[in-house]
Amino acid sequence: EAVAAYDLALTKAKTNYQKHEALYYLAVYYCEMGNKAKSLETLNLIINSGETIDECSLELIERLMKSACISDCDDAKWQEKIAEIENAARVKDSLNNKKINDLNNKINELENRAKNNSDISKMTTTNDNTRIVKRIADPLQPISADGYYKLHFAFDESDLDKESKDILDRFVIFLNDNKDLKVNCVGHADIRGTYEVNQTISKERSTKAKNYLVAKGISEDRIVISYTGYTEPEVIDQYIARSHPVFKIGDTLTNEFIDNLSGEKKTKAHQLNRRVELNIIK
């Protein structure tokens, strides 16, 4: 009757451990009945089940091995099998711990990267050596009062492309919703050409941005323009790196940096320096 009850428990077991637990109690029953052979046979069913032996099942096996009817067994085969299972469990634990550590490190890396990407800034030195921290905003999102936005231009041109107009249109919406705020437009140029020429073209670019806003109904006294020529090279932010993966975040497009480039990458670096940066001011 006892064996039948344990057999029923085995058929109803839903997990490996539940099966091992039923066999464990059956082995204990045989021990209590003084039938060491049947107890060892039942223990062997757990060890050679071909199923995963987890920590809980391993504890049951060890408990059986220490029981009164089995502990005096001098069969080296059993001891060797138990040692093998224990070693396999230790290896599995070690691998699992390594996987957990690797996953934790990956999570930390991704969290740090996400934090950096969500609030990346760049440090710029102006002509008077003033250090300015710029928080670069996502150019595809609505305008943020504390973000910097960029318009880019073709060589020796000040015409606004569609992407630039899209950004300026969002500035129009923001400025109409915030009547007490102004916008600052700073023109830039690439290193090619004389100082005077680049001052002129960078001024034309910031003026074009201003004129577009004025044409959309923004009062001139709410738009401040300035220009720097090629004195403030672009610093690659995460949004530029996303659309131009040949560059990495933090690359500063100085003349020395660009001189080491070639082909399309060099051409693109010059283009990224040709820009107008916009930000909201009070």
Image (cartoon, grey):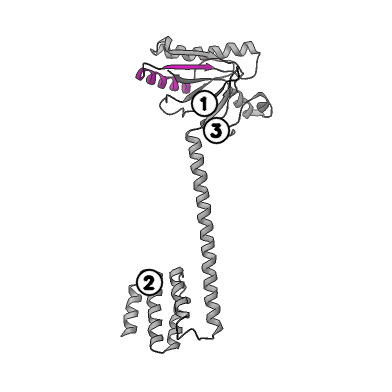
Give the secondary structure at mark 2.
helix
Answer yes or no: is residue 209 visible.
yes
Q: Earlier in the sequence, mark 1 or mark 3?
A: 1
Q: Which residue is mark 3?
A: 241
User: Considering depth in this image, is 52 or 265 the residue closer to the camera?
Assistant: 52
Q: Earlier in the sequence, mark 2 or mark 3?
A: 2
Q: Which residue is mark 2?
A: 18
Give the secondary structure at mark 3.
helix
Q: Which is in the foreground here, disc 1 or disc 3? A: 1
Q: Which is in the foreground here, disc 2 or disc 1? A: 1
Q: Earlier in the sequence, mark 2 or mark 1?
A: 2
Q: Position of residue 109 (x, y in %)?
A: 52, 44
The residue that appears at 51% across and 68% down in the rendered structure is 89
- The quadrant in which residue 169 appears is top left
49 inside magenta stretch: no
Amino acid type indicated by mark 2? Gln
Mark 1 to mark 3 CA distance (whole Å): 17 Å
The residue that appears at 62% across and 29% down in the rendered structure is 265
Q: Which residues are magenta?
A: 158-186
User: Considering depth in this image, is 205 or 34 the residue closer to the camera?
Assistant: 34
The residue that appears at 48% across and 33% down in the rendered structure is 119
Q: Residues within 10 Å of mark 2 (few under 14, many from 20)?
A: some
For residue 134, which numbered disc appears in the image?
Answer: 1
Quadrant the N terminus occupies: bottom left
Relative height, residue 21 to residue 179 (above, below): below
165 inside magenta stretch: yes
Mark 2 to mark 1 CA distance (whole Å): 61 Å
Amino acid type indicated by mark 3? Ala
The residue that appears at 42% across and 29% down in the rendered structure is 141
